[in-house]
Amino acid sequence: QVQLVESGGGLVQPGGSLRLSCAASGSIFSINAMGWYRQAPGKERELVAVITSSGTTNYADSVKGRFTISRDNAKNTVYLQMNSLKPEDTAVYYCNADAQTYYGSGRLRDGYWGQGTQVTVSS
């Protein structure tokens, strides 16, 4: 199994910045894509950004130009740099990893979720 631990959430003012981190651990053979999702009260969970093992990135239209996703493959860690934050960015942010793990004598590929970290943008 894979454990994902997020950190870096908190309260910031509109226009401020925040950097989220997510470290993966466990019996990991490899990690393909890693990403960030968010869910606001009364809203569906949505993809914020994703990055592949080769460095290809994709962003939700609402965060393009403001957020940057990056990763450190050696540390199995993904980051989300959030700039020019807006009240609409307020949500619980979840880390996700598409990983292969050792499973018996073989391997299992599945998606894994962190517990989430609260980001609140308010004056």
Image: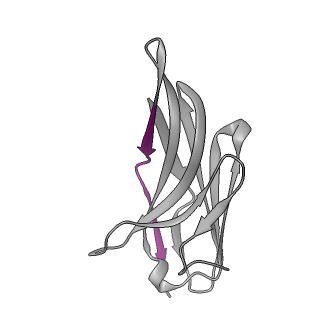
Q: Residue at x 43, y 43 (%)?
A: 111
Tally the marks: 0
Q: Position of residue 25 (x, y in %)?
A: 55, 33
Magenta residue check for 119:
yes
Where on the picture, by quarter, is residue 45? bottom left
Query: Looking at the image, is 26 positioned above or below residue 94?
Result: above
Residue 110 on image: x %, y %: 43, 38
Q: 89 or 99, which is in the foreground?
A: 99
Check the image and report above or below for 61 versus 91: below
| Residue 20, picture quadrant | bottom right
Residue toward you, 20 or 63: 63
Residue furthest to the left in view is: 42
Residue in view at x 47 percent, y 36 percent: 3
User: Measured along the vertical axis of the image, is residue 7 above or below residue 107?
Assistant: below
The N terminus appears in which quarter of the rendering? top left
Q: List x then y, in percent, for residue 54.
A: 72, 48
Q: Nearer the viewer, residue 33 or 72?
A: 33
Is residue 113 on the magenta stretch?
yes
Q: Residue lying furthest top in this view?
A: 105
SS assignment for the magenta stretch, majority: strand
Please name the residue shown 52% across and 59% down the image: 36
98 up-or-down from 42: above or below: above
Q: Which residues are magenta?
A: 109-120
Q: Is residue 92 left or right of residue 74?
A: left
The scheme the figure's colours follow is: one colour
